[in-house]
Image (cartoon, grey):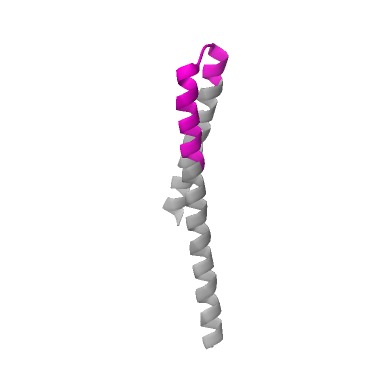
Amino acid sequence: MSEDKNKKREEAVDAIKGAYAFEEGVINEVTTILASGKAALKKCTSVGEMRRLNKQVNEAIRMVTKWERREDWG
């Protein structure tokens, strides 16, 4: 029985580590997208570029929204 409990604890710890790694990855990716978008916006010269940047920002927002929903369920 003790081995079973230890195995379950290890699985729980692994799941928590995975969740933290996922969150960190999402935060890093969103930060990168927004930072590159901000830098590109300063150099933006066409409507096409603005649309592309808008898509990047919207994708970052979607990622954060998905992440927040996942957090609410957890």
**Which residue is situated farthest in the top direction here?**
46
**Which residue is situated farthest in the bottom direction here?**
1
Q: Quadrant of the N terminus?
A: bottom right
Residue 39 magenta:
yes
Q: Is residue 41 above or below residue 47?
A: below
Q: Position of residue 9 (x, y in %)?
A: 50, 75
Q: Quadrant of the C terminus?
A: bottom left
Q: Tally the marks.
A: 0
Q: Residue at x 51, y 18 (%)?
A: 50
Q: Is residue 30 above or below residue 6?
A: above
Q: Is residue 31 above or below residue 69?
A: above
Q: Position of residue 20 (x, y in %)?
A: 47, 56
- Which region is colored magenta? 29-51
Q: Looking at this view, is 3 or 25 the one in front? A: 25
Q: Residue at x 52, y 80 (%)?
A: 6
Q: Looking at this view, is 51 or 42 the one in front? A: 42
Q: Looking at this view, is 72 or 28 the one in front? A: 28
Q: Residue at x 48, y 50 (%)?
A: 24
Q: Position of residue 47 (x, y in %)?
A: 54, 12
Residue 35 magenta:
yes
Q: Is residue 9 above or below residue 56?
A: below
- Predominant SS of the magenta segment: helix
